[in-house]
Amino acid sequence: MSNSRALLIILIVILLFTGLVFKLVDIQIIKSDNYKYYAQKQHTKLEKVKAERGFIFDRNNVLLVYNRNDITYYLDLRMTPDRKKYSLANRFSSVFGKSSSYYSKLIQPNDKTVVIARKVPIEIAQKLKDIKLKSLFTIEEPTRVYQYGSLASHILGYVNSEFVGTNGIDKYYEDVLNGEEGMRLVERDAMGGIITISDTETKTAVPGDNLVLTIDKNYQSILEDELRSGIETYKGQSGTGIIMDPNTGEILALANIADYDPNNYGKYSDYQRKDRAITDTYEPGSTFKTFSLAALLDVGKCKENDLIYVENGKYKFKNTYIRDTHKNTYLTVSGVLEESSNIGIAKLIQKIDNDTYYKYLRGFGFGNYTSITLPGEVTGKLKKPNQWSEYTKTFMSFGYEVSVTPLQLITAYSAVVNGGILFEPHILKYITDKSGNIKSVVPSNPIRRVISEETSKRLTKILHEAVSKGTGSQAESEIISVGGKTGTSQKYIDGNYSKQDYNTSFVGFFPADNPQLVCLVLVNSPQVEKYGGKVAAPIFKKIIERILEIDLKKYQQPERYDGNEILEDQFVTAKLNSTEDNKVMKTKNVQPVKNKFVDAKSNLMPDLKGLSAKDAIVKLSLLGLKYNINGSGVVTSQSIKPGEKINPNHVIKISCSEAIIKGANIY
């Protein structure tokens, strides 16, 4: 080799070495901070820590909804040898039951990361734990589990793929259930594995609170079973059922059939996922006659034994005809409801002026929200008197030219039979923390007195006779006395009333002499029968008799407090001083419920004055205090003054008296 060639090679080596030195100096000294920043950014990340979502229970603490941590499998195809893909596809195929070709197609690309299996339960993931492949990694993801599938699906709702409530209770109480997210600073290796977690940069997630609902899981199951069976028997398109405590407004069960499984909500249609008990309206037909008669009785325009000529079943009113199913010549006022006479109620309603009739209907809550804490509620339709035609009041008296939701109807019926008080329906009983400690209680909320207690008693008796003597006979039970009203209304389709499609319904209650439970059954377009007395009433009977199989004793005796005194009026006894025509809204001293939750953590004596006797008892029980109660109605005095420190050994004496509920004059 010549000297010149050797010198050239040496020079090239020196230049390369010099360049390498300069590059190392640039990386390690001049730009070291920049490269260190990018390296840390690649390996260190501030990650959100999802808070555990709150659980949901029924009124008896039966767990309905909880969370489960599942495993999602990711495969980095850039780091996966082709020889491994075939065996991996076969392995996943054997575990999950899908064909190996499905997985082979999934992992064919070479330049990305793919999800092989999402949200795999832990017990199944255990079958894959022996796979040793660096390019296969897993992430824990929470899954919302609805313990009983479709049971109470329209009440519970569901969460979407982002774990956010999208319907039902899960949506309405999103802020209560979702808790507070945490944060953590995580350093990961090139494969995504955790190296360290910085304690100083970690903020612990705060779990969401639990919800205890008013519903009874057993009642809910019975309602759904019998409603589904009834729809199958009578070949109906769909159905809705609600069970309510008329004395508190608590919803004990609510169902729509067809329904859906919240665990797989994406497989169902919008119609199936919709809570039709609060989102869909219908013309109620003859069940509405009860409210027409309530107004007439309350203003003294008729008496039960007054005779009405009902035209032998066909009556010309102005330029149209009103017909009855049963041909009668004369009926008493009670008989009008018993026989469900359109002609009889149409003649009776002429005795009351438009404004007074409208005020009563508004007083029962029609044309307004019930304020149920579920998303999607609508108001129904109740036209103001200045929008009425010459036929409106007459047709409205037997349930046409007015639209209601099933929840509005059962809430109004509860007011008819509970002594005349309209309660706000509610689905939440109380809220607890993750340890089960009660944080807040939802009390019953009386809105207004609609009819007098005397009118309520008279109507309750008439409705009992509508079952024992009238169109509701197929709802009668040998186990317990029942009252109620049938309803059959033609559906309004494409601008005309259908002669084939009907809404058939029954709203009933028991015991008839002291109503403790109200149940609504609505069947949409039955094909086997069309009348509420032949479709909905038998379904109602099966529902209540199954309930009585498990809870007969509960409904045979009134609830007792303090082991001695029966609190005859558990909530409110209200008296009105008004003239006949404006009695419905002329109420006094109504105090709106300012706060729906009761603080259960204070160690100071709360102010109980003005609370209903039952709400006072709930509050004292949560505070662990013993008590003696004198009287009924609302609290007027307490032996321990508000603000005094609580001594668990003390017995507080509270006095109650009848209260007068106030309300707004609604027009």
Image: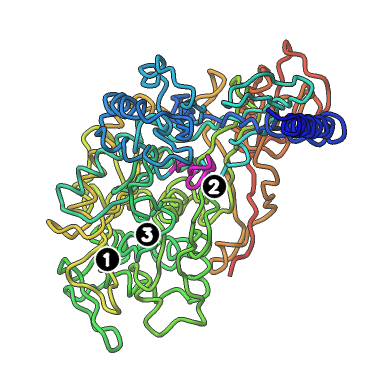
Which of these two is toward me, 71 or 305? 71
Count of marks, rendered view: 3
Magenta stretch bounds: 155-168
Q: Which kind of residue does numbered mark 1 sit on? A: Ser
Q: Which mark is residue 429?
A: none
Look at 47% across and 24% down and name the residue there. 61
Separation of marks 3 and 2 at Cα, in angstroms: 27 Å
Q: Which residue is mark 3?
A: 290
Earlier-in-chain disc, 1 versus 2:
2
Under mark 3, the amino acid is Thr
Identify the disc placed on residue 373: 2
> Does residue 416 lie above or below 63 as drawn?
below
The disc labelled 2 sits on which kind of residue?
Thr
Q: Nearer the viewer, mark 3 or mark 1?
A: 1
Q: Quadrant of the C terminus?
A: bottom right
- Residue nearest the viewer, comparing 149 with 370: 149
Tag 3 secondary structure: helix
Image-based side of 274 in relation to 184, left or right:
left
Q: Few, some or many C-alpha atoms within 10 Å of disc 2 (few <14, some 14-19, many ≥20)? A: some
Q: Mark 1 sits on what residue?
A: 489
Q: Picture coordinates of residue 154 (x, y %)?
A: 41, 45
Q: Could you give the CA–CA distance between mark 3 and mark 1, rounded to whole angstroms?
A: 15 Å
Tags 1 and 2 touching, CB below 8 Å: no
Left or right, 607 with respect to 283, comes to: right
